[in-house]
Image (cartoon, rainbow, N blue to C red):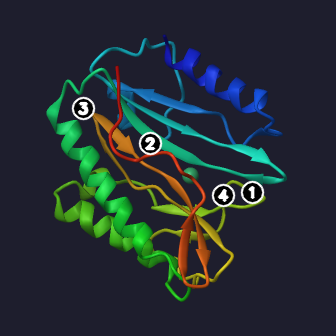
Amino acid sequence: MTELELARFVSDAFLAHGAQKLSFDTIIASGENGSMPHAVPTNKVINAGELVTLDMGCYFGGYCSDQTRTFAMGSVEKPELEKIYNIVLEAQQRGIDAVKPGVVSGDIHKICYDYIAEQGYGEFFTHGTGHGIGTQIHEEPYNASGHKTVLEAGMCVTVEPGIYVPGLGGVRIEDDILVTKNGHEFLTSAPRDLKIIK
Ligand SMILES: [Mn+2]
């Protein structure tokens, strides 16, 4: 199937299951298209061996969701992409671990960025680590460079580092994390290990 066909399937499934509307146009980026962080789905056919990035969300009860998974079609043809996947996953885990009241939002980004840079991919992580999410899809606090909002219980943020290598592909993993009195809680629950679709 094509990227557009998969995007349409996901979008329709949200609405069929009771969503009020989508949070944003569903993003599907396969193969080399995965190297574009803000890819728009195309008529490109999704091929075996490729990674596919799916970024999706919907409104329910007036609030929105925003979640990204990158998965493999049958296998991972290019071994560097599996390495990149594991770097992004570890960066995301470190960022999520840091989410708690009193932490400065920009520091969440720094933790993710520094790990990715240590692994040699700093120049390929080209956006902020995340954003607040609530009645709007992008709102304060921003987990991005230079942002100084102090996290408080009740805030919800995304943690979504990514690595995008032109000509190779890309990986992004995103979850919605609620700041709680004692730390944080995942609002998204899909497994995060690299899933190989057979
Ligand atoms: Mn997001």
Would you call the spot at circle 2 few (<14 residues within 10 Å), some (14-19), or many (20 or more)?
Answer: some
Q: N-terminal of the two: label 3 or label 2?
A: 2
Q: Secondary structure at mark 1?
A: loop
Q: Residue at x 32, y 65 (%)?
A: 113
Question: Please, what is the three-letter code of the amino acid marked with disc 1?
Answer: Gln
Q: N-terminal of the two: label 1 or label 3?
A: 1
Residue that numbered label 2 is attached to: 37
Q: Residue at x 54, y 39 (%)?
A: 55
Q: Secondary structure at mark 2?
A: loop
Residue that numbered label 1 is attached to: 136
Residue that numbered label 3 is attached to: 168
Q: Nearer the viewer, residue 178 or 42?
A: 178
Q: Nearer the viewer, residue 65 or 131?
A: 65
Would you call the spot at circle 4 few (<14 residues within 10 Å), some (14-19), or many (20 or more)?
Answer: some
Q: Secondary structure at mark 4?
A: loop
Give the spatial CA distance, label 3 vs label 2: 13 Å
Q: Residue at x 44, y 42 (%)?
A: 37
**Percent of width and height locating residue 158:** 55, 60
Q: Nearer the viewer, residue 25 or 36?
A: 25
Residue that numbered label 4 is attached to: 138
Give the spatial CA distance, label 4 vs label 2: 16 Å
Question: Please, what is the three-letter code of the amino acid marked with disc 4?
Answer: His
Give the spatial CA distance, label 4 vs label 3: 29 Å
Disc 4 C-beta below 8 A from ligand 1:
yes
Disc 3 C-beta below 8 A from ligand 1:
no
